[in-house]
Image (cartoon, grey):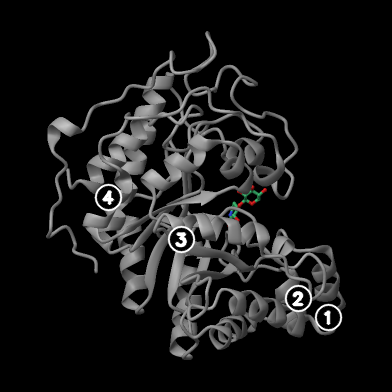
């Protein structure tokens, strides 16, 4: 499936029109291009980072509807390279802002639910599953020939309170988590009406120093718990591709080594794990993103275990860098291009951004600072990063 760049696709040069970020395209007069120096214009600064920010917080309606600004869609270019290109999707703007769905369907071939497939949403009370919001996103994806990455079955955040209580009590914790995994994967079975081909089974189970993270599940189920989760998932849907997903383990280093060792052990023990998700929440500036050789080496060793490697949540923070707006946007474009290029060469099969428009990004809420970490600006106009990504996908 992956062609290692042998089959080069080149977009016709005349068709690739450079699109400048344009102040006329809807940014408030005097507003900073990327919102860094005028907090409050384009970003929900200071909004509490609730557990489901993008799915309930009011959004900023885009001031114009993007039309013919791009000539080559990311997804067409990605198809030609044999890679999926994806975005995390929030429920609210998908309903409220026509431009959101338009750009999503035009540019991407994969979607991840930003929040609504997490346990707090899917099983709000014991035994009562609520698939409505998630299924709406799945239906959108299916209608537009996009694949779905399921995210996530077990994590230490965004659990329903009842499940946290069960886990803390220690009693029936395993049964409760197993029932959750089974309920979700049965609904989304690949031989059923709403197939979800790939799942982040476990999210962020390793600490930044490479230890097993002390989470509700590690405490309740013991250090060997990860293998069980993959086995339960595999039993519920033998056709689902099962991933371990984490952040900060992209380049080489202590955490990446620990993730590698964890997966090596699981594979050695015959545990049904099929892939690794590298989140890739990075930034501009020194040491804010993995070097190309480190990233390539890490992907290579993971693939050597027989695992598929996906980039699952990429965004590139501007707040970590310095310089003018234009310089920062250019640096951001370079980081996106370097990482996508390295990943394609290294055999990554799916490349997902955590959102796609700066109008709906988790970064300002998470960091408490305005930013502009995604390839489209708040008006849905493509940024330099977008054009750099298309050039990489076109083989240039
Ligand atoms: C984030 C969402 O983007 C936010 O809307 C929510 O408030 C918190 O979770 N790593 C992950 C994602 O695996 O699930 C997180 O998503 C971002 C970090």
Compared with 49, 380 (above or below) is: above
**Location of mark 2 (residue):** 219
Verify CB contact (< 8 Å) between mark 4 and mark 2.
no
Q: Which mark is residue 142?
A: 3
Give the number of the mark in front: 2 or 3. Answer: 3
Verify CB contact (< 8 Å) between mark 2 and mark 3.
no
Q: Earlier in the sequence, mark 4 or mark 2?
A: 4
Pick the residue in front: 202 or 212: 202
**Location of mark 4 (residue):** 76
Give the number of the mark in front: 2 or 1. Answer: 1
Verify CB contact (< 8 Å) between mark 1 and mark 3.
no
Q: Could you give the CA–CA distance between mark 4 and mark 2, rounded to whole angstroms? A: 45 Å
Q: CB of residue at label 3: within 8 Å of ligand 1? A: no
Left or right: where 111 falls relative to 124: left
Q: Could you give the CA–CA distance between mark 1 and mark 3, rounded to whole angstroms? A: 39 Å
Q: Secondary structure at mark 2?
A: helix
Q: Position of residue 43 (x, y in %)?
A: 61, 27
Q: Secondary structure at mark 3?
A: helix
Q: Position of residue 152 (x, y in %)?
A: 60, 65
Q: Position of residue 66 (x, y in %)?
A: 41, 29
Instruction: Report the residue that reaches farthest toward the bottom.
Output: 269
Asked if residue 153 shows in the view, the reply is: yes
Pick the residue in front: 16 or 305: 16
Verify CB contact (< 8 Å) between mark 2 and mark 1.
yes
Q: Could you give the CA–CA distance between mark 4 and mark 3, rounded to whole angstroms? A: 17 Å
Q: Earlier in the sequence, mark 4 or mark 3?
A: 4
Give the number of the mark in front: 4 or 3. Answer: 3
Q: Could you give the CA–CA distance between mark 2 and mark 1, rounded to whole angstroms? A: 8 Å
Q: Earlier in the sequence, mark 2 or mark 1?
A: 1
Q: Could you give the CA–CA distance between mark 2 and mark 3, rounded to whole angstroms? A: 38 Å
């Amino acid at each position: 499936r992956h062609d290692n760049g042998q089959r080069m696709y080149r977009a016709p040069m005349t068709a690739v029109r450079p699109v400048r970020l344009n102040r006329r395209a809807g940014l408030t007069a005097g507003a900073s291009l990327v919102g860094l120096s005028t907090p409050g214009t384009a970003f929900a600064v200071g909004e509490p980072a609730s557990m489901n920010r993008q799915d309930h917080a009011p959004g900023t309606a885009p001031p114009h509807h993007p039309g013919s600004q791009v000539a080559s869609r990311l997804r067409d270019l990605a198809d030609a390279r044999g890679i999926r290109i994806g975005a995390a999707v929030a429920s609210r703007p998908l309903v409220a802002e026509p431009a959101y769905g338009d750009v999503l369907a035009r540019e991407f071939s994969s979607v991840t639910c930003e929040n609504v497939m997490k346990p707090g949403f899917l099983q709000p009370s014991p035994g009562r599953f609520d698939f409505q919001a998630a299924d709406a996103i799945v239906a959108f994806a299916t209608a537009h020939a996009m694949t779905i990455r399921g995210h996530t079955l077990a994590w230490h955040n965004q659990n329903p309170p009842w499940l946290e209580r069960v886990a803390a009590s220690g009693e029936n914790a395993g049964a409760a988590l197993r029932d959750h995994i089974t309920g979700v994967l049965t609904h989304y079975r690949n031989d059923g009406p709403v197939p979800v081909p790939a799942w982040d089974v476990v999210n962020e189970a390793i600490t930044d120093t490479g230890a097993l993270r002390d989470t509700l599940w590690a405490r309740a189920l013991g250090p060997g718990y990860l293998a069980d989760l993959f086995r339960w998932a595999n039993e519920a849907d033998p056709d689902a591709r099962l991933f371990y997903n984490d952040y900060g383990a992209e380049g080489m280093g202590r955490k990446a080594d620990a993730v590698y060792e964890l997966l090596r052990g699981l594979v050695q023990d015959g545990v049904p794990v099929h892939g690794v998700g590298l989140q890739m929440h990075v930034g501009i500036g020194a040491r804010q993103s993995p070097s190309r050789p480190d990233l390539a080496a890490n992907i290579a060793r993971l693939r050597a275990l027989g695992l598929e490697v996906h980039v699952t949540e990429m965004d590139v923070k501007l707040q970590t860098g310095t310089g003018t707006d234009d310089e920062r946007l250019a640096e951001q474009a370079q980081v996106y291009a370097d990482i996508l290029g390295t990943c394609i060469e290294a055999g990554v099969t799916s490349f997902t951004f955590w959102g796609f428009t700066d109008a709906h990004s988790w970064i300002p809420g998470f960091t408490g600072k305005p930013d502009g970490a995604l390839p489209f600006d708040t008006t849905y106009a493509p940024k330099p990063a977008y054009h750099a990504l298309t050039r990489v996908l076109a083989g240039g």
